Amino acid sequence: MSPNDHYSNPQYIGQTNLDVQTLFKQNASLITRQIKVDPASGLQQKIQQLTTLDVKKMIHEVSADEEGEAQKLALQPGARIIIPNKEPTKCSIKRNGIVRAYAAITNQGLVRTYNEDRVSIILNITKPSHRKDEVWPKCSFFGVYDGHGGHNCAEFLRDQLHHFVVKQDCFPQDPREAIVKGFRKAEETFLQMCQGRDENGNAIVVDRSGSCAIVILIVGDMCYSANVGDSRAVLSISGGQIVMPLSRDHKPSDTNEYSRIAQNGGQVYQTTTAQSLEPDTSARGKSKNSAQPGHYPGDAKTQKWSEPEYVIGPIRVLPGRLSVSRTFGDPEAKLAYRGGNMNVVKAEPEIRQFRIHKNHDFIMLASDGVYDKMSNEDISRCVWESCDKNKWQSNPSYRPAQSVHQQCGLAVESVLKNSLYRQSLDNVTVVMIAFQNFKRQVFGQGKNSDRDE
């Protein structure tokens, strides 16, 4: 397994150096225009939108992985960052096979009033009753499910996806095949649950929710990373000297996904919006010919509107209008009678497998709300800085971890808080799976370094 594979160097469609003002000028005939009243100011708002299917006219926004350090807010100790609606961090209390410790935390974020993310941690996988006499290796299952359009799909995956995987006859002998078959069965089952009949017996959709999924399945000393969507997993090696991606974001802007979408009859598009406000003349009193302050006849003709504020929308996929190209659920994107196409947005996982070695530190899983603002290297650095007592001890609220379990809790809190500090507007969820080398790096090679606590 090499860090220099296609996971490390994704390629995207769209232009990073395309000037949005020039784009609007060159495509004036394609722009839709409307006037609305801004509810905050009462002023008229001119909205212009350009929607294009031409990849040469799409703008690729620089991600956290591509952004230079100078453009980012510096990482902060987690104890210094206060976040709203903080939920308790869940940590392990003892080791489980090769998993030395783990921790998980989720938060609804800065602007949302709900949390559609869900987490699954299954440490003691139960064998099917008809196979209870078989000898299985130690198995554990970790999943982060980033729901959208409602929480039903994410909750279904949290409660059921691991069952669909481990109940395959090929598990645990062939975990990779079990993941493929289990994911397929979970998708089929949920799409059936999404459908019903109206009073005339016609098929209807009763649940429109969907979810991304990033799963880590550990069987003995083998690790399987399975990804559907744009949540992500990364592996830290040798005390953070190497940070290796274990998944590839499934976005319509990814060149591999774009080709797959086009080959299966789908399309990608992007909408860019320019918003301008009319001149604010309210300070000059009422117009003689108008009962409302600031609304002078001919204002829009005789005075300049404010400079437009451009909002570059994500590159999306049709059918479905989703900004991710692989998901569970989302029946509107998949069912033929709703105009969907099962081969465009699909729940087929990309899987990578590897043996866990002595120099492997930890795996970090997180929803895209985290990775939108933090690169893979940011995540790793944030974890290791949370272990640096010299960096933190000047903060009066800092309490050093007394165990590797507590340290995992501090690490996931620090990652989550820093993503919100950098103004992530999505739900955010972080799960950390630590191996023995993480404990050695943090707590040393003492005589108790391999004990169960």
Image (spheres, helix red, strand yellow):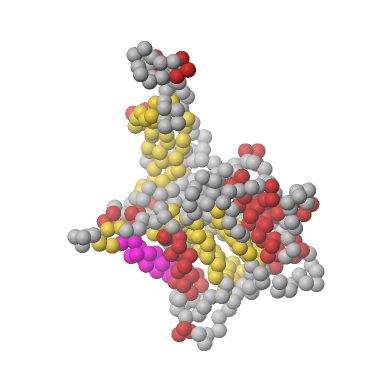
Q: Is residue 104 above or below residue 391?
A: below
Q: Is residue 200 above or below residue 294?
A: below
Q: In the image, is residue 182 part of the stretch drawn in magenta? A: yes
Can you say which quadrant of the picture contains the N terminus? bottom right
Asked whether 356 or 384 is in front, the reply is 384
Q: Could you tell whether 424 is left or right of 250 in the image?
A: right
Asked whether 26 or 49 is in front, the reply is 49
In the rendered image, which quarter is residue 104 located in? bottom right
Q: Is residue 423 above or below residue 120?
A: above
* Whether residue 177 can be seen here: no
Q: Main secondary structure of the magenta part?
A: helix
* Whether residue 279 can be seen here: yes
Image coords of residue 433 (percent x, y): 62, 64
Image coords of residue 317 (percent x, y): 39, 48
Labels in figure, total: 0
Q: Which residues are magenta?
A: 179-195
> Which residue: 43% across, 70% down?
181
> Which residue: 35% across, 54% down?
333
Q: Is residue 33 above or below residue 333?
A: above
Asked whether 325 or 154 is in front, the reply is 154
Can you say which quadrant of the picture contains the C terminus? bottom right
> Which residue: 68% across, 65% down?
405
Q: Could you tell whether 188 is left or right of 386 in the image?
A: left
Image coords of residue 296 (percent x, y): 38, 16
